[in-house]
Image (spheres, rainbow, N blue to C red):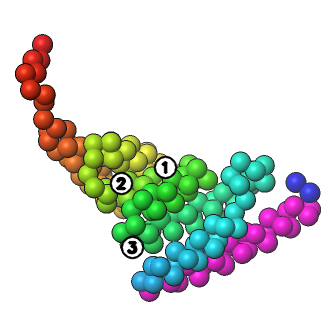
Amino acid sequence: MDGDSDSVQLKVIASLTHLKSEGNELFQVGQYEQAVARYTEAVKLLPDLDDGAVADSGLRTVAAVILCNRAAALLSLRKWVAALASAQAAEAWDPTNWKAPWRQGLALMGQQPRIERSEMAIACFQRALASGSMPQQQRADAQRALSAAQARLRDGRDAVPLPENCVLC
């Protein structure tokens, strides 16, 4: 990368960090809609993920944190689908961020129960638990969430009736 590109990227990261801080302050006082708006402003500044400029791990990390924070605010607003999308985007930016699959799982569990959602939530919680960056104190919550998703999957499968005249061999 040349000096001009480095300078532009540093300015983008500074702007992202500022908007993230504003969003965090709003989130802390329960102003979730406004927090989402700040995080969304930051997301609009992100380059295309496929752009060669995003090879920088600093930009990838900041982008993932902003998207995870937006997912948390959306979860607080019970906007499950939007929270899921933000958390999925966060994982695309930084697959090592344990909060991305964690929040995906929470968003899936907040939605109307369906077998495939339960299966996806299980996979998300398992990815979060497999992450080396997940703090030890969070692991118990993640294990409980995984158990809840597994129970919901069993309940969902048990609720599906077998067809009439079904013969199991």
Q: Are marks 2 and 3 in contact (CB under 8 Å)?
A: no
Disc sitting over residue 77 in the figure:
3
As rendered, which of 96 and 12 lies closer to the eye?
12
**Which span of residues is magenta-colored?**
3-29
Q: Which residue is rendered at x = 49% and y = 57% of the image?
A: 85
Amino acid at the residue labelled 2: Leu
Measure how far apart labels 1 and 2 are at the Cα level: 23 Å
**Element at badge 1?**
loop
Q: At x 66% / y 67%, what residue is drawn?
A: 44
**Magenta-drawn stretch contains 26:** yes
Q: Is residue 154 above or below residue 3?
A: above
Q: State the residue position of label 1.
A: 132
Residue 106, position as x, y percentages in the image: 36, 58
Q: Which amino acid does the dot numbered 1 rest on?
A: Gly
| Residue that sits furthest to the bottom in the current view | 29
Left or right of 142 on screen, residue 13 = right
Left of 151 or right of it: where is 69? right
Q: Nearer the viewer, residue 60 or 119?
A: 119
Label 3 secondary element: loop
Give the prevailing secondary structure in the magenta stretch. helix
- Element at label 2: helix
In which quarter of the view is residue 60 placed? bottom right
Image coords of residue 169 (percent x, y): 12, 13
Quadrant including the N terminus: bottom right
Q: Which residue is mark 2?
A: 108
